[in-house]
Image (cartoon, grey):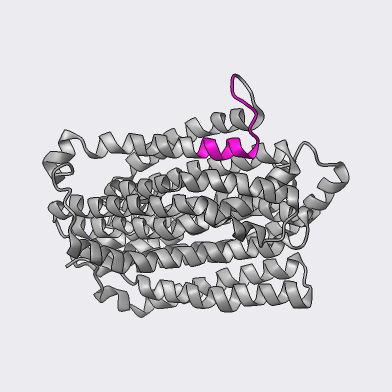
Amino acid sequence: MISLWDKPFGYKDVLKVSMPLAISMASTTIMQVTDRIFLGRYSVEAIAAALPAGILSFLFISFFMGIASYINVFIAQYTGASKPEKVAASLWQGIYFSLGAWVILASMAYTMTPVLVSGGHPPEVLELEIQYFRIIMLAAGLPVLDTALSGFYSGRGLTRTVMVVNMIGAIINIPLDYALINGVWFFPEMGIRGAAVATAVAWIVIVSIYCPLIFSNKNERLYKTRTNYGFDLKLFKRFIKFGLSNGVQFFLDIFAITFFVYMIGRLGTIILAASNIALSIDGVSFFPAYGISVGVSTLVGQAIGKGRPDYAKRATVCAFHITCIWMLFMGIIYIAMPDILISMFRPNDITDVQFTNVLEHGRIFLMFMVAYILFDGLALVYSGALKGAGDVVFVMKSVGFFCLTIMVIPCYVGVEFIKAGSYYLWSIFTAYVVVLSFVFYYRFKCGKWEKMKVIE
């Protein structure tokens, strides 16, 4: 480990690029967790509605966000290849795409609510789901634009800026979230609608900070960020070619979780609330690891741009070691204090008997998370490495195939025909994560990605 510390693309470089992204993702996680805590304490219906509506909205957002996020790889490879004039050109293609995506996503605010109705959740929960979903979707273009703009920094390895901007968004979101949900200070009591509005405001703040930073005089001199704004059809097509596969993969990943949550919802409000709490807690371990995965994509992209796949291998292995340490740490916390973690989300209007049932199910769900947590880290790091090299089509096909065969079909058959319970569904979810981790690891070891590149 010590010998790899100072080597190019070793532990030091991985931490330099990935840790700010991990902290950035952690701030996003804190926003989501506090949102769930505030809603959980507001009412049991609010916490039961928050995750299904949130995941469904993110399901649609994820497709466009996945495409926009691939700007990071283009900028990374152009940076590695020392082509600064292409960095701003790539950024602008991502901006144009994001603005178009915003129009499409906003139109879904009302056209896609029948999907929520088809979930079969109780009427009082459904009403809250629709309220939350509509507000989020009207602002949904903002996180897509945020993803494209942040690529200007993360693709060049300047991830501290991304961290600071996201932390500012979190600092604004958390107190506003509490105030709008509960109606404190001079704010009205809006319940779950307040949570959605607070999220939208945080997105507005983040985008508003990025714009003057990116289009500054310094970046204009170095990259022509203000003048190199032309629509480059050839570059845009190449961006869509690779980004589309990334968007589909991201969409399918979120779809698997969405379908899982909707199947869980058919087992009753208490089990749904317990699963929602467990998945909210799971975000504490997942999103920082996802930040490391984005950092790996950046480093692998830069290494490929330099023509040094050996650097890419080194960065991936070092990132996996770091991710393992994080995941083991979180696994120990899940084992040591499950009741404390779950109790943070206890609704104010739930009886002791009801919460005891939530607690009993939640403890078991956390143990499932402990079982797959290391495999989750393995899947994130190695899929991130493959995408950074340009092997995104394989990642997309793998997620699509196993999402259907391991998650969707077994979950549907189990609930609708076998009448299986929640433990069966969580076992399926665990198997899905484990299988994908080995698939991505094997693909990386085969080395086909070493000859790939997304830039000309």
Q: Residue furthest right?
A: 353
Q: Look at the image and tell me whether residue 229 can be seen.
A: yes
Residue 3 visible in the displayed image: no
- Residue bounds of the magenta highlight: 186-199
Left or right: where 234 falls relative to 63: left
The residue under the point 46% across, 44% down is 139
Residue at left offset 61%, top offset 44%? 131
* Front residue of 164 and 118: 118
Quadrant placement of the N terminus? bottom left
Where in the figure is residue 279, as x and y percent of width and height? 63, 54
Q: Residue furthest top?
A: 186
- Is residue 193 magenta-colored? yes
- Is 21 displayed left or right of 31 in the figure? left
Quarter in which the C terminus is drawn: bottom left
Q: Quadrant of residue 414?
A: bottom right
Please report the residue visible at 71 percent of the width from the left and 36 percent of the height from the top.
Answer: 42
Residue 11 place in picture, x, y as percent = 36, 54
In front of the other: 383 or 109: 109
* Residue 333 position in % (x across, y down): 64, 49
Horizontal side of 125 relative to 156 (left or right) equals right
Q: Nearer the viewer, residue 88 or 426?
A: 88
Location of residue 207 (image quadrant):
top left
Which residue occupies the foreground of this view, 176 or 139?
Answer: 139
- Percent coordinates x, y for residue 373 in the rendering: 58, 61
**Quadrant of the image occupied by residue 209:** top left
